Amino acid sequence: MTSIAEQLSSNFDPQFFKRARALRKRLVFTLLALIVYRFGTYIPLPGVDISVMADIAKRNATGVLGMIDMFAGGALWRMTIFSLNIMPYISASIVVQLLVATTPSLQHLRKDGETGKQKINQYTRYGALGLALVQSYGLAKALESSGVAVNSGFFFELTTMCIIAGSTMFLIWLGDQITSRGVGNGVSMLVFAGIVANLPESALKMLTLGREGHYHALFILLVILGLGLLITFIVFMERAQRRIPMHYPKNQTPNAGGNYLPLKLNNAGVMPPIFASSILLAPVTVSSFGLIENDTVGGIWSSIVYYLTPGNPIHMALYSALLIFFAYFYTALTVDPSDTANNLKKSGAFIPGIRPGNATADYLEGVLTRLTAIGSAYLVSVCIIPEIIKSKYTIPFYFSGTSLLIVVSVVIDLISQIYAHLVAYQYESLMKKDRRARRK
C-alpha cells in the first residue's frame, strides 16, 4: 500500500506551483542570495596585483590550489574578498562536532533540543571567526612572499585579515538566511554555487583544446560519457534506502501495512568528502603559498606535502580512510538508534519479529552499520576514481568526485525540498476544499 505522501505525489498538479506564493518567495530569496554571493567573488581585495595572481593561477590551475579555487567559485584566483569562502566554517564544524562526540558537557548540550543546538552553532561560529583570522593572516603573508601584494607591511596584513574574516562571517550569515528563509541548506548551496560557476568555463576550455587538436574527439566523448555514468550512479546511491517494515497495533486502516522506517544508504551525505578534503588540503595549502621558509622544516614539510598531493597513493589511502571514518562518525551524529527505538516504543510501533526497546535499538544499529559500510564504499569509489583518472590523464581543469558529489547531492536535496513544499501546499488546498464541502 502507498503512503499518503505518495498518493498526493501521484496526483500532483503542476499548476499548484503557480499558486504556491510562499515557495516562490523562498526560491526568489535563494536566487538573490546566490547572486549576492557571486557578486562578492568579483570584488578584488585591496592592495593586490591581479596580473601577478593570474600568472600563479595559470601555473596551478590543475593542482591543489585549483581545487581550493573550485570550492571558492573562482574567488581565489581573482583574489577577492570571498577568497576563503566558508572553508573556515567547515573546518570549525569538524572540530566542534568531534568535541561534541567526545565531551560529555557538549553531548548533554546537544540533547537540550533547539536551545542546545543554537549554542553549539554559536561555538562553531566563534571557531570559524578564529580560523578565518588565522587563515587570512596566512593568506596575507603568502601574498607578500609571492609578490602579489603591492605594498607589503602591517597595514596590508591587518586590512586583509579584517576584510577576509569579515567576508567569511558574512557568508556564514548568508548561508543561515538561505536555510531559514530560502530553499536548501545554506552552506551546501554556497559551495554548490561556487562549483557550478566554474563548470561552463571548464567545459569551454575542454572543447577549445579539443578543437585545437590537443585532445582527440573520442577522449572528450569518453570523458562526457564517464561523467554521465558517474552522475547516474551518484543519483541512484543517494536515493537508495532500506525500508524497514513497521506495524502500528492502534492503527488498523488499510494503509497501516504500508508503513515503514526509511534508512538512507548514505546518511552522512556530502559531509565526509568535504571534511576529508578540508583536512588533507591544510598542509598542501600552506606549502603552495610558500609560508614555510626554514630549510629543515621546509624539507620535512615538502615531503609531507608530496605524499598528500592528490594522485599520490598515500593521499588516496588517507583520503579513503578519512571518508570511511567521517561516514561512520557523521551517521552516528545524525541517526541515534536508541532514540529512534524509544520514539517507536512511545508511539506503540514495533518492527515485526523484534521486541521493542533495546532489542529494536540493537537491530537498528546493526542495520545502520551495514548500510554505512556500503555507503562509505560508495563515497570512496566516487571520490577516488577521478583521482586515479587524473593521475594517468591530463585534464585542463580541476576535476574531482567530491565536487560532482556535492553538486548532485545538493540538486537532489533542492528538488526534494521544492517538491515537499508543493505537496504540502496541495495537501492544505485539499483540506480547505474538504472543509468548504462540509460547510455546504
Image: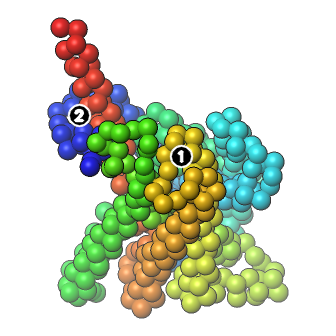
- For label 1, the SS is helix
Seen in the image, is 54 located left or right of residue 145?
A: left
Q: Nearer the viewer, residue 60 or 177?
A: 177
Q: Residues within 10 Å of mark 1 (few under 14, many from 20)?
A: some
Seen in the image, is 401 located left or right of residue 283?
A: left
Q: Nearer the viewer, residue 189 or 422?
A: 422
Determine which residue is flagged by label 1.
344
Which amino acid lies under the numbered mark 1 shown in the image of this protein?
Leu
> At x 24% / y 39%, what residue is drawn?
8
| Residue 198 numbered tag | none
Q: Nearer the viewer, residue 2 or 125?
A: 2
The answer to whether residue 110 is above or below residue 223 is above
Image coordinates of residue 257 in percent, x first then y, are 33, 49
Image coordinates of residue 356 in percent, x first then y, are 57, 52
Cα separation, mark 1 vs mark 2, equals 35 Å
Asked if one can make out residue 423 in the rendered structure from this viewpoint, the answer is yes
> At x 52% / y 86%, what residue is drawn?
311
- Disc nearest the viewer among 1 and 2: 1
| Residue 17 numbered tag | 2
User: Reading the chain from its start, which is encountered first: label 1 or label 2?
Assistant: 2
Query: Which quarter of the figure is the C terminus placed in?
Result: top left
> At x 37% / y 48%, what residue is drawn?
259
Residue 100's image quarter? bottom right
> At x 45% / y 79%, what residue is drawn?
381
The answer to whether residue 299 is above or below residue 148 is below
Q: Residue furthest top?
A: 440
- For label 2, the SS is helix
